[in-house]
Image: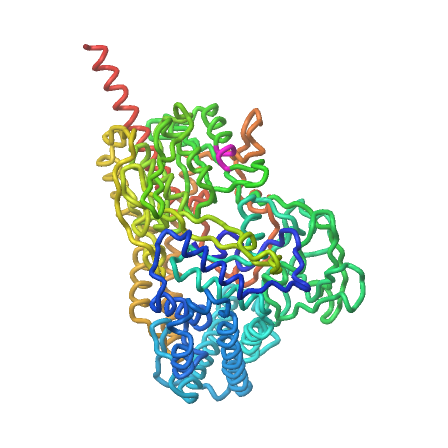
Amino acid sequence: MKKHSLLKVLSCGLLLSLTSVSCVGAKTDFNEVGKQMLIMLRNSHYERYDFDAKLGERFFDSYIDSLDASKQFFLADDIAKFRLKYGKNMHQLLLEGKSMEAASEIHALYRVRANARIKFAQELLKNEDQFTFDGHRTIMRDRKEALWPATEEEANQIWRDQVEQALLSEVLRRETIAELAKKQGKDDPLNDKNTPGEKIALRFERILHGINSSTPEEVADSFLSAVAKSYDPHTDYFSMSEMERFMSGMQNALVGIGAMLQAEDDGATKITGIVVGGPADKGGELKLNDRIVGVDTLNVGTDEAMVDIMFEKLDRVVDLIRGKEGTEVRLKVEPAAAAPGEIKFIVIKRGKVELKDELAKAEVIHMTRPDGSVHRLGWISLPAFYADFKSWETRCSVDVQKLVDRLKKENIEGLILDLRGNGGGSLEEVRRMTGFFTGRGPVVQVKNTLGRIEVKDSSNPKPIYDGPMVCLIDKTSASASEILAGALQDYNRAVIVGDSSTFGKGTVQQPMEIRKMMPFMVDARRAGVLKPTIQKFYRVAGSTTQLKGVESDIVLPSLMDAYEIGEKFLDHAMPHDNIRRAPGFRELNRGNLFLPVISEKSAARVKSSSDFKYIAEDAKRLIERREENRISLNKAERKKELAESDQRSTERNAERRIRFGKMAEKDKKTLRFFRLNLEDIKREELEEIDRAKDKESYMRHAKDGVADLDDTPEWPSSLDPVKREGIKILSDLVEVTERARMAGALQNNNG
């Protein structure tokens, strides 16, 4: 997945975490880091690319793309000059330890261009009345395939268009929210003291501040990451700070103050969530919607130690606030409930924060059938294949085993494993977990660059659960999720349900500390980590999950299928191929999944479902919009589009309120849900779920007045269409399996 996919990005914020590693005084030679990284790539990466000008040009293009993917900062002549100077020899500069001069020169001009472009945009916004939005021009939504501007005049026009589009969108946003609030008899929740132009200018200011405050280490990080990604999308370079966040993300327990942050347009950092029972919550002084404007990194209470974080990058704010467990951090805060300009200083002792929302959890579902019989179904949600690689005290396989054991005590007749949104994680955990459902046998095959194939077997002599099973997937189910889903499918152990396929990441990366390769006399304290692709995954049936992913047995309409989500849309993705079946692989009888029967029943329900119909309609519109790749700068045309969308939503919501009311009444008679989180394992009796209470059990969230205007009714019983259909598919599978078992038993008795 993407570089920060495992860093616990929650909504628009980041959970404060980790231990601090100071970079003050660090003098790591990133020329040497680049040299050693390239040698490691050449020796370790799965694909042994020729070390030639073609590879050098790929490095160059990747770095330029990382800086200016939308082709709106550089001029065409800038790129031509840099390409002539560095394009075909970037690989040699890396090997000779001279690459950072090139990277820094390119970044320096990028900074100059960015300052010129953004300041030009901010000047335009000082006279926002000049934009009348009454022309009939359109601009590209996505400029990835556009050409770089040839002249300053062309560049300025691109920015005029971007400013006009941003300004029009902000104007329409404000008008739409005001109209919606008036329609609902509520006050306008925005009450923004800034004009639309001022707000856009502040957004640009944050971008500009991030560019201008980039440190040499951050420039090196950007460049070396681009070089690494030139090999394939998942080969990457991590700075020390990024590696720390990655490792903490895998542990599902962070050291910090237990608060969620969001960057505000005006430069401050707002508290949008507080972990219940975390350090900030226990302290009691930091409140939701408070704004942090400074951090005393030394906690000494002096003005010199207080760092101004206005317009600072969110990652850097997190780095300033984080620290060792038991230490204190002093924050300069503008309280949400105070008068404008009032300041408060808050001291919080850092502590360990468990990310309970990211842990495996389960439910027991009692489903009453038309004949009065009750199916007891189990549901396990697994957000990631997490593991603490240092102590192994935290392991998702151990957690899932506990949940399965308790579900069996609850006498479940079928099980759903929900892998939607699971981006992967530990290979060892997925190897062990697969055996819970398949027993002893091969789980995945791993091939290295020399062609050597290793088969990873499960360690369980027999499955701990062998009943009917459904596995839910979507386009963001990746890596380890695909190994598990693929094995369950190859063994004919479970019915795979969801999007058309999973993500398609079938490669293995191994973190390697670059400092271990650095010369003895060179300072390598912050050399960082290379994460090269060293192997490819193959399913036990022989097909790699690379590019194609795992295809669903029963495909449900999905908005994700309308977006360009998946390995095949990433630059330099490795190919799909096949190898031989894994030795010892013996699949179960596919007929025991009864796919023709349950697929037919599901298709009939989906066809008659208004919600799946809405999803299919929206997906079609998204595809058409993406392919057209144009957006109007005419306010009347845009308002017409918004009115059509609003009318569509109004009609849908009116229909849903009536239908959802009936569904909720039926659910009360036919469905009961019992919570089974890890802390519930030893309960004598499981508690029935109170959805409203559970929403705030882990984190208290700041109220969002704009979000409150959304009058779309909530899913009955908190069952989104996919979850509801998944339960029905499992119920069908349980029912037909039981009928087949009884028929078989009757035949044996008659025999």
Residue at 45% over, 69% down: 93
Color scheme of the displayed model: rainbow
Q: What is the quadrant of the C terminus in the image?
A: top left
Residue at screen point 44% across, 84% down: 160
Say which residue appears at 41% left-offset and 56% top-offset: 42
Q: Specify the quadrant of the image occupied by residue 442.
A: top left
Q: Is residue 675 above or below residue 123?
A: above
Q: Quadrant of residue 319?
A: bottom right
**Camera-nearest residue between 569 and 495:** 569
Residue 352 placement (x, y as % from top left): 66, 45
Identified at 37% across, 54% down, the residue is: 655
Residue furthest to the left: 751
**Does the segment drawn in magenta span residue 397?**
yes
Left/right placement of residue 259 relative to residue 664 reads right
The quadrant in which the N terminus is found is bottom left
Q: Position of residue 717 (x, y in %)?
A: 45, 42
Q: Is residue 606 visible?
A: yes
Horizontal side of 433 relative to 694 (left or right) equals: left
Q: In this view of the protein, which residue sits in the foreground, 444 or 593?
A: 444
Q: Please state the extent of the stretch shown in magenta in the rendering.
A: 396-400
Picture coordinates of residue 683 (x, y %)?
A: 58, 27
Q: Is residue 425 magenta?
A: no
- The relative height of residue 82 versus residue 397 in the rendered view (above or below) is below
Judging depth in this view, the residue of 605 and 477 nearest the camera is: 477
- Placement of 189 over or under 439, stated as above or below: below
Query: Is residue 269 positioned above or below 10 on the image?
Result: below
Q: How many marks?
A: 0
Confirm whether residue 615 shows in the render: no
Coordinates of residue 435 in the picture (x, y in percent): 40, 30
Is the stretch drawn in magenta largely helix, strand or loop?
A: helix
What is the quadrant of residue 687 in the picture?
top right
